[in-house]
Image: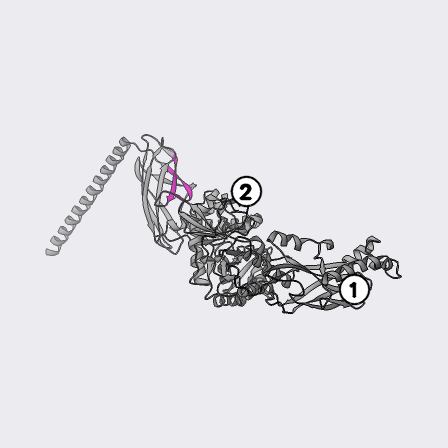
């Protein structure tokens, strides 16, 4: 009956079209009379604002669809009607569904047009005016007979000629004896930012975090999602972001063109951290390596120790500031892609699970169904579980601006329903949703999708770590890492000064008595962040700040009294020269001092000795030196401070040593002269003593008389 009515409507539209074109005042409604008419039609819009229930389960369920029509043509329009179009044949695969939803041609809309309650006449619509509409239908009216996903659309017709339409999907899920497999769905939500500090102090390079915490800011949105998300959702954090927020709670400064601008302690940052701790108290939390380093670039540029240190530091920060149960065995690499070198570097650092983009680990053979998300990769440290995110499902969590929450929800329901009913798929599979790592979420949309996923009978929300390769897994082709992927890494040129800053920073800890980790580890790791892939200028600016801070720390230990204008004198051919080192740090250090001659033809010295120095003290050593025989003049020596393993600390210094050139005969003559002088002095003293005795004797004789 519906099909006959549809054919009659189409025939009527064809017969009426010439009359409509010739009618007075109908210029704005012509179908093809002029370009202006076409533009006018394109400006008439229809939108769907609700579909209830979103998943009808009984043949008699009343499906109510509501929305609005807006006349943006600039001229009044009449003869409008909103209609429900449908297809009683279910879609067979996800590709067919995607093709239908992306098609903008009105000629490919579902053929069937309902003539019962599934239409609504719109009164004459003034220019710029909108009109709400409501249409209803039942599964039996639409010819739905079995579980599946069906094409529907709401179109606006003028005098029965389609003008514009909104496409969507309708999932029908009647209760049946044989239910579809219940697939596991893991939702991984990233909380990843870019570093906002350089060195580990309270100086920020920008104030973007304070903006992100306020109102509809990105971090505020993420907190809103966390406060309503179920405990099965896995949260992936960059611990450096937590560190930056924690630094803001104590008062901070922001670097500007005019100098450093003081900011008060941020209450918002403290509230955000507290809110996240509370919201995620029972949720799985994964901590990325500190500052989200570009692991692929580190692997390719020889940064072999930094990744492990980033994982250690990331775990410490996340457990201290967010969740004591934060785990570091899961890694989500930049862009969701890595190669075998990066995988090995992660594996030897304790990672046994990676979250990847679907292009990075495709199926070995082309498949027409949705593959299981879990697979196994081989690394130098053994098997690593790879979890491949579903591209289409992940995109639904961060659609283009202005995308309808209702239509995104309907698409999500349809996608997962088609997956559960794909031909030949009898075993439950695992699926992963992972939006882009630095996304800006819509809290209303994300919350709606997660809530919907939790109540669909063919889905089971599960933590990311619960997914493991099983019988449903399909063979994968191995890691696919393209030349373009390699080009997007942090370059060797960018990382060279970072490597230099890292090496110098490590020395500052090697000379301490406690041999603790470098206080600059976090600062240098921020320079390796994958965030700088698209902002190398900002990364280089931060590198200069960190390098300056490391140099300032290194220079707190100095060889004193050095320089060519301050010569030291070596009296004779053999002797010692004192050399002092000042420790301006508050902690004791243990280093070695090494001295070697730059002019061995004038001066011989090759000396090394350990030199412990207390905090705020000066250490002095007596360096033995030998001048060449029968020579005199100025020679230079190089003085170096070294760590226990022989690495040079700070800049080597040159000292000028002035030799007097005394030979052995000259020393004998000088010695003899000194002996004669000493004998004369002794004789004079004895003579004076004798004279005093005689004077005292004469005095006694005169007194007795």
* Crowd around label 2: few <14 · some 14–19 · many ≥20 (10 Å): few
* Residue 579 locus on image (x, y percent): 35, 44
Residue identified by numbered label 2: 482
Point out the image quarter for the N terminus. bottom right
Residue 230 colored magenta?
Answer: no
**For residue 651: magenta?**
yes
Image quadrant assignment for residue 704 = bottom left
Residue labelled with disc 1 = 80
Disc 1 crowd, CA 10 A, few/some/many (<14, 14-19, 20+):
many
The residue furthest left is: 704
* Residue 519 tag number: none
Foreground pick, 606 / 73: 73
Q: Main secondary structure of the magenta part?
A: strand
Magenta-tinted stretch: 634-657
| Along the line of sight, the residue nearer the viewer: 319 or 642 | 319
Question: Is 696 left, or right, of 468 in this rendering?
Answer: left
Please state which of residues 581 and 359 is positioned toward the viewer in this rendering: 359
- Res 679 → quadrant: top left
Of the residues tagged 2 and 1, which is closer to the observer? 1
Q: Is residue 84 visible?
A: yes
Rendered residue at 70%/68% (across/down): 135
Q: Relative to 542, say whether 269 is above or below.
A: below
């Amino acid at each position: 009956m519906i099909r006959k009515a549809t054919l009659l409507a189409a025939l009527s539209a064809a017969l009426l079209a010439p009359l409509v074109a010739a009618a007075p005042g109908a210029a704005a409604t012509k179908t093809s009379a002029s370009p202006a008419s076409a533009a006018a039609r394109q400006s008439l819009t229809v939108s769907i604002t609700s579909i209830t229930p979103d998943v009808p389960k009984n043949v008699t369920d009343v499906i109510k669809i509501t929305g609005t029509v807006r006349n943006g043509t600039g001229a009044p329009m009449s003869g409008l009607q909103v209609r429900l179009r449908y297809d009683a044949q279910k879609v067979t695969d996800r590709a067919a569904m995607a093709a239908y939803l992306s098609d903008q041609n009105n000629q490919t809309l579902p053929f069937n047009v309902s003539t019962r309650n599934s239409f609504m006449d719109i009164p004459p619509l003034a220019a710029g005016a909108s009109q709400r509409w409501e249409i209803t239908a039942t599964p039996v009216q639409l010819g739905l007979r079995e579980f599946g996903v069906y094409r529907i659309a709401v179109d606006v017709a003028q005098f029965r000629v389609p003008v514009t339409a909104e496409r969507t999907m309708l999932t029908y899920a009647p209760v049946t004896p044989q239910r579809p497999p219940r697939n596991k769905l893991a939702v991984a939500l990233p909380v990843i930012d870019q570093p906002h500090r350089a060195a580990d102090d309270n100086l920020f390079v920008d104030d973007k975090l304070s903006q992100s915490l306020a109102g509809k800011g990105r971090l505020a949105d993420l907190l809103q999602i966390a406060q309503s998300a179920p405990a099965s959702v896995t949260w992936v954090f960059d611990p450096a972001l937590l560190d930056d927020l924690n630094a803001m709670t104590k008062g901070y400064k922001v670097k500007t063109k005019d100098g450093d601008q003081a900011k008060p302690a941020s209450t918002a940052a403290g509230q955000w951290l507290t809110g996240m701790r509370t919201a995620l108290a029972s949720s799985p939390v994964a901590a990325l390596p500190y500052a989200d380093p570009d692991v692929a670039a580190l692997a390719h540029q020889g940064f072999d120790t930094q990744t492990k240190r980033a994982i250690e530091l990331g775990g410490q920060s996340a457990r201290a500031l967010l969740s004591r149960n934060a785990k570091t065995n899961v890694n989500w690499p930049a862009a969701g892609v890595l190669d075998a070198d990066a995988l090995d570097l992660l594996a030897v650092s304790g990672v046994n699970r990676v979250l990847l983009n679907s292009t990075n680990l495709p199926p070995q053979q082309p498949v027409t169904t949705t593959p299981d998300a879990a697979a196994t990769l081989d690394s130098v440290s053994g098997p690593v579980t790879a979890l491949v995110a579903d591209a289409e499902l992940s995109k639904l969590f961060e659609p283009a601006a202005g995308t309808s929450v209702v239509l995104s929800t309907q698409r999500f329901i349809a996608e997962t329903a088609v997956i559960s009913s794909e031909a030949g798929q009898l075993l439950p599979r695992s699926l992963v949703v992972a939006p882009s790592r630095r996304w800006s979420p819509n809290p209303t949309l994300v919350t709606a999708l997660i809530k919907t996923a939790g109540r669909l009978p063919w889905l089971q929300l599960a933590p990311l770590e619960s997914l493991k390769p099983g019988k449903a897994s399909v063979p994968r082709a191995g890691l696919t890492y393209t030349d373009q992927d390699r080009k997007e890494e942090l370059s060797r040129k960018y990382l060279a000064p970072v490597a230099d800053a890292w090496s110098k920073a490590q020395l500052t800890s090697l000379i301490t008595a406690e041999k603790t980790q470098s206080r600059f580890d976090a600062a240098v790791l921020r320079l390796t962040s994958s965030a700088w892939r698209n902002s190398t200028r900002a990364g280089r600016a931060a590198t200069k700040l960190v390098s300056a801070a490391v140099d300032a720390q290194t220079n707190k230990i100095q060889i004193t009294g050095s320089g060519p204008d301050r010569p030291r004198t070596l009296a004779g051919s053999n002797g010692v020269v004192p050399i002092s080192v000042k420790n301006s740090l508050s902690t004791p250090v243990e280093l070695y001092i090494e001295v070697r001659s730059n002019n061995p033809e004038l001066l011989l010295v090759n000396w090394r000795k350990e030199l412990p120095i207390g905090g705020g003290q000066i250490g002095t050593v007596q360096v033995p030196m030998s001048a060449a025989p029968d020579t005199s003049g100025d020679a230079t020596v190089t003085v170096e401070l070294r760590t226990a393993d022989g690495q040079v600390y700070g800049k080597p210094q040159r000292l000028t040593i002035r030799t007097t050139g005394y030979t052995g005969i000259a020393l004998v003559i000088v010695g003899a002269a000194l002996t004669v002088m000493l004998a004369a002095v002794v004789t004079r003293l004895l003579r004076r003593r004798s004279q005093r005795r005689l004077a005292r004797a004469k005095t006694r004789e005169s007194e007795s008389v």
